[in-house]
Image (tube, rainbow, N blue to C red):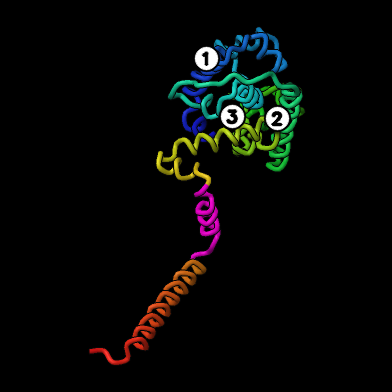
């Protein structure tokens, strides 16, 4: 999400091409995708032509439907690579729930900041009636207006991302896969071998161990090594009491 904050205009300009490319690559029709999103085909065509921006929940759902990482839609570089994903039930309901959650988050943040709708409207240039609809979750918020609202409220957009639904869980899995594939090849090979699992678990335990405990462990190992050396020397002395 940080990428879109650094270069929002270029990303939003390229997003419609990425949505269209991803849909074509996975073999889905306008009717199929629009049906899953719960919108009409005319609106989806506007998303793909760049005349209208989808809301954040719709972008999350599109990434899920088209089986691409969310970062791909927010990127301005690289090709869009997709895999076909079967139709899934409940996506329209999830989008509605996400709209409600985002609206409630905006409302809570505005209230905590002691701002009335009129103040927020002046800051953003968004009509009061529209802000009311957004906060109720009745109307999807186009991404460009969500960014404007978030900035006006000092709200981190990352806190609005979905992490709990099937869409969010899949997206988090894609992020982990993407990070793994970006690791050096030798690290990938090591981590993918079952016999190395114990070393990976040991690494996790070491990471969770404080520096003081690690230093104490190293000291203890050095002491054991020293004792073993002394013991070996004593054995040699006993076996050879009269060296030449």
The residue closer to the viewer here, 16 or 25, is 25
Q: Label 3, on which residue?
A: 147
Per the rendering, the mark at residue 118 is 2
Dot 1 crowding, Cα within 10 Å, few <14, some 14–19, many 20+: some
Magenta stretch: helix, strand or loop mostly = helix
Q: In the image, is 104 to the left or to the right of 4?
A: right
Q: For the residues marked 1 and 2, what is the alpha-carbon distance in whole angstroms?
A: 40 Å
Q: Quadrant of the N terminus?
A: top right
Q: What residue sits right under mark 1 in the picture?
A: 21
In the image, residue 123 lies at what x, y percent?
A: 61, 30
Give the secondary structure at mark 2. helix
Tell me which residue sits at (67%, 32%) in the image: 119
Chain-order first, disc 1 or disc 2:
1
Give the side of residue 233 with respect to residue 174, left or right.
left
Residue 203 part of the magenta-drawn span: yes
Q: Secondary structure at mark 1?
A: helix
Above or below for 221 versus 88:
below
- Let me know if residue 143 is in the magenta part: no
| Residue drawn where x is 63% and y is 34% of the image | 161
Between 244 and 188, which is closer to the camera in this rendering?
Answer: 244
- Residue at 45%, 24% in the rendered image: 76
The tag earlier along the polypeptide, 1 or 3, is 1
């Amino acid at each position: 999400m940080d990428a879109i904050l650094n270069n929002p205009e270029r990303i939003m300009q390229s997003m419609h091409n990425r949505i269209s490319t991803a849909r074509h690559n996975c073999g889905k029709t306008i009717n199929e995708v629009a049906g899953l999103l719960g919108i009409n085909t005319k609106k989806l065509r506007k998303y793909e032509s760049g005349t209208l921006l989808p809301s954040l929940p719709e972008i999350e759902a599109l990434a899920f439907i088209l089986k691409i990482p969310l970062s791909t839609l927010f990127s301005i570089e690289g090709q869009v690579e997709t895999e076909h994903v079967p139709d899934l039930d409940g996506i329209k309901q999830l989008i509605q729930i996400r709209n409600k959650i985002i609206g409630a988050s905006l409302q809570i943040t505005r209230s905590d900041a002691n701002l009335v709708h009129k103040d927020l409207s002046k800051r953003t240039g968004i009509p009061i009636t529209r802000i009311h609809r957004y906060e109720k979750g009745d109307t999807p918020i186009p991404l460009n207006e969500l960014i404007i609202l978030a900035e006006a409220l000092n709200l981190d957009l990352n806190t609005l991302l979905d992490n709990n639904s099937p869409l969010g869980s899949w997206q988090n899995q894609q992020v982990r896969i993407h990070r793994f594939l970006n690791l050096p090849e030798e690290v990938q090979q090591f981590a993918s071998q079952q016999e190395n699992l114990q070393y990976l678990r040991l690494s996790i335990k070491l990471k969770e161990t404080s520096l003081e405990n690690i230093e104490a462990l190293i000291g203890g190992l050095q002491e054991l090594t020293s004792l073993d050396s002394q013991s070996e020397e004593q054995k040699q002395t006993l076996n050879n009491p009269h060296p030449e």
